Image (spheres, rainbow, N blue to C red):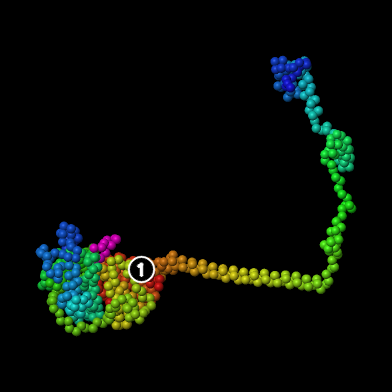
Amino acid sequence: MSSEPERDGRRLTRQSLTRQCRAFLRQGMDDLAVTDSSLREHIANCEFCSARSAARIRLPAALSLGSVPVAPPQLHSAPFLDEIRARIVETSEATQIGRLLSVGMPVAPPLAVEDACWPSALLESDLGRRTMAVPHPADGPTWDRVKASVLEDVTSQRAHRSRQQAALRNRGRTLAGVAVAAIICGWLVSERAQSPPEIVITDVVSMPNLEFSPMTLLRRGEQR
Amino acid sequence: MLSAISNQRRSPRIHLQFAGTLCALVFGLASFGHAQRGVSAAPGGSPQSSPSTVLSIAALEQGPRANDHTIVQLRRFFDGRGGVVTVREELRVDANGTGSPPHVLSFLGVEGELPASPLSQKWAQTYGRHSGLFYRHGCFHIHDLVKAQQNYTLHNFGVVVRAGRTAHRIVIFPNQIFPNGLDKAIWLLEVDTATFVPLYTAEYDPRFRLLSEIEAVTFSPTVQLGAPSPSLMVVTPQPSFAAAKAFMGDPAGVIEPSSTLVGEYGLQSVDVAINPLNNRQSLTLCYTDGVDEFFVVQSPGTSDFFAGLPTNKSATGNTNTIARYRDASMTVLLFWDDTVGFQVTGRGSLARLDNFAKSIYAQALSQ
């Protein structure tokens, strides 16, 4: 398949195009109103260029999507489509491939509901009788006892949960108290250990008047 | 009084002579070659044959213990403001080989003062109450021979005459240099060559300031003790801190200081003193390095020294104050805890007393 254009029934090559033809392909295809007079004259005289100039004007209208026809409403009808599909199937069954498929992949029709039944041995067994027997409704006192039993059970469970929650709360409070006491004791101990008493020495300018001071006596013989 | 003033004028001249001797010791010790530890050559360079006549620290300890003696001597007290009071006293010692022989220290008078003057009467009362303290802690003694030999060196400066007796002039110099320099006293002594009893004692601080002085006027190697006059201050020696505490009735708040904090010093004696005026007791612990001493006094039932002063507690309420008085001659550190008044006191240059007082205070606070 060749991509080269043809001119007057013979294949065009790059060498067979004239300079005016190449100028038209380069400029005139984009410019509908060709302003160059020499080029306009060439288009009028050149069959190749005039054919393409005319095609350029017709093609946009031909390619417009606005001219697509609307499908008829019967195509959206399910029975109509089913008829089409049935006709296709009937047609296909009559062909050779239809016959091969019917032989190779036979289709068993489903059993009718009225034909399906339980085995008689099963229905006649003790289990079958019990299953098919309609139970007698419970009498009022029985239902009362059941109701009372259920309520009692619910009440006892609720009380048990309450006791458990109370015990957990008490245990939690006790543990929290012990933990707080331990933290406070630890803090106090650490405070005492970490901050030894600060002792400062302050100078006094005169000797305090003491009741008994050995050095004061030895040095000065002073006594109170 | 005029005589006392005359004493004040005369003393500096005498002291300058001794200070010159000490300076010569310090700056010329190496060249003299006299420095010996414990034992020194006899005057004139001839060694002594008898151990009792060998000048040494041991001889200084044994001499006064082995020889009776009676001395009339002058003791000078310096009041810290440049004033001097000279007291004439008589010391009679009936030696018995121990460090606490029977003795009598009698007040004879204040030099330059009439016997009936107020000053004489005041000093007579002081001697009547504290003569025992003056003898035990106010004279030069070798309190602990082993410690003294470890901590001091004896330097011999030849022979002099004192109170009509031939005497060795010696210097007892401390060996240990405290981290910030010498902090103990330097002793200049003149000891009788026959008995090694001190006839002159001068105590200097590391800056050669005279702190105390005792000068013998007459010396006799005999004694007639007589009946000692009863002391007004009752001082009872105790064998240990526990015994002293029990003797005092086990008062609360009294503590036994840790002896590991005083370096080369060790506990020498434990005394309980009772003031006859108010019957108040004081526990006195005496620490020594062989020669030097300091004291820890605990007085139960004492009111807070600083109760009348504005508090200086910190924001944490955890500040405790020690009041310190310090001059060249003495250091006194005072604090109070749990009804007990504490007093740590020693010589002025003994800076290590600060930390010892703090440790005792912390120990008291932790009780």
The C terminus of chain B appears in which quarter of the rendering?
Answer: bottom left
Residue found 78% across the figure and 19% down from its top? A50
Q: Nearer the viewer, residue A58 or B239?
A: B239
Which chain letter matches label 1? B
Determine whether A198 is above or below B88 in the image.
above
Q: Is residue A47 above or below residue A220?
A: above
- Residue numbers of the magenta segment: B175-186
**Would residue B345 be found to the left or right of residue A14 on screen?**
left
Q: Residue at x 18, y 59 (%)?
A: B29
Find residue B71 and report its horizontal and vertical position in percent. Answer: 15, 76
Camera-nearest residue between A193 and B59: B59
Q: Magenta includes B7?
A: no
- Which of the pair A98/B316 is nearer the observer? A98
Residue at 18% over, 58% down: B30
Mark 1 residue type: Ser
Can the viewer see residue B203 in this picture? yes
Q: How many marks?
A: 1
Residue at image coords 76%, 16%: A10
Residue indicated by mark 1: B359
Residue A69 at x, y percent in the picture: 85, 34
Query: Is residue A124 or residue B171 the one in the foreground?
Result: A124
Residue B184 located within the stretch drawn in magenta = yes
